[in-house]
Image (tube, rainbow, N blue to C red):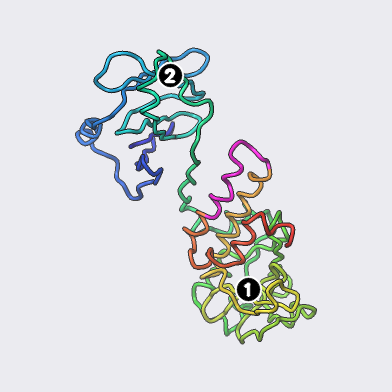
Amino acid sequence: MISVNRAGDEQVWEAATGRLIQDQAPLADTDRAQSHEHSARWEVELDWDISSVLHLREAGREGLVGTIRILQLEDALACGSLIVLGGDGGLFAIEVDAEHVTTSSKPYVQLANRPHGRIVPRPLDTTRLQPTHQQLERLFGEGVVHRLAPADIPADVSDPATRDFLTSTGFPAVSRYYTLNMHTVDLSQGGLQDVATRFPDVRPAITVPESHYALGTWINGLLCLDGKTGRVVLVTSVLGPDRSHPEITMVGSSLESFTVMLGVYWSHMPVYKQKGCDSDHVLEEIQHWLAAIDAPAASSRAWQHVLDDYYWDIM
């Protein structure tokens, strides 16, 4: 199905799953006309009073068999066994309980007092994947994202993409922030330093390899940049919850992807804390976006724990 927003932008969706079909070019007028020639079980007709009223009848049969009252509904389309609804409230695909509707003796059936289903995470905003310094400043705050001059980056930080990110974009200095329990370094104060210099009071529970530089602390572990590969890793400390099984865990395939993942958490969690009508689905969307940004890192225990409310009191 095709949705069109108020700006005229088109998106193509798979109605049965809610999946956005990526890289789909807008349909030509001839294809658009053919796309409406489908086999639908239901015929729908919109009416309005205080709220939008969707009249429902089985295709090829006379007589109204059901109604649905929905706020902010602007259009509806039957597609196979589904009914697609669109408007200011969002885009939805519902499946009607056909047996209940067609065997009811009532001329008007309230199909559901409340919807039963799930909100599908929005597709990742791909403009986040290569942020600029200005975009990160708007997100994290003015004066929070710090860059380094090329001469101030240690020589054994040899990964070219990492060096470029540090000089052109920068890394944010953040503290705690909801359930994140993360503190990152202010690069304007001393630049990149080894773990022992930056955090003399935090002892790693496992040897930190050379060319690893301190980026901060997270869940009582040491957040480090691997200068050779550009990866961001979490090193178990003697105070960490996993100290009995110390390890070095990759939490970002690159410094850029880690920063982007941090930005997604930073922008979404205030929405979750507002406890709105769909706030329960915010954590699912964060997980969906993190996996789209950097799947190996998103599957790490660190990222999984900060998005699981079971662990929040523990952390």
In the image, 93 versus 186, the foreground residue is: 93
**Front residue of 60 and 119:** 60
Q: Secondary structure at mark 2?
A: strand
Residue placed at 60% from the left, 65% from the top? 170
Image height of 290 relative to 69, above or below: below
Is 45 magenta? The answer is: no
Are there few (<14), some (14-19), or many (20+) residues within 10 Å of tag 1?
many
> Residue 234: which disc?
1
Q: What kind of element bears circle 1?
A: strand
Q: Quadrant of residue 233?
A: bottom right
Q: Nearer the viewer, residue 88 or 82?
A: 82
Name the residue beneath numbered marker 2: 67
- Type of the residue with mark 1: Leu
Please report the bounds of the magenta region as a residue range: 274-287
Question: In the shown orientation, is residue 32 left or right of residue 198?
Answer: left
Residue 110 at x, y percent in the picture: 47, 20
x and y percentages locating residue 245 in the rendered image: 65, 79
Lateral position of residue 13 relative to residue 122, left or right? left
User: Alpha-carbon neighbours of circle 2 within 10 Å: few (<14), some, or many (≥20)?
Assistant: many
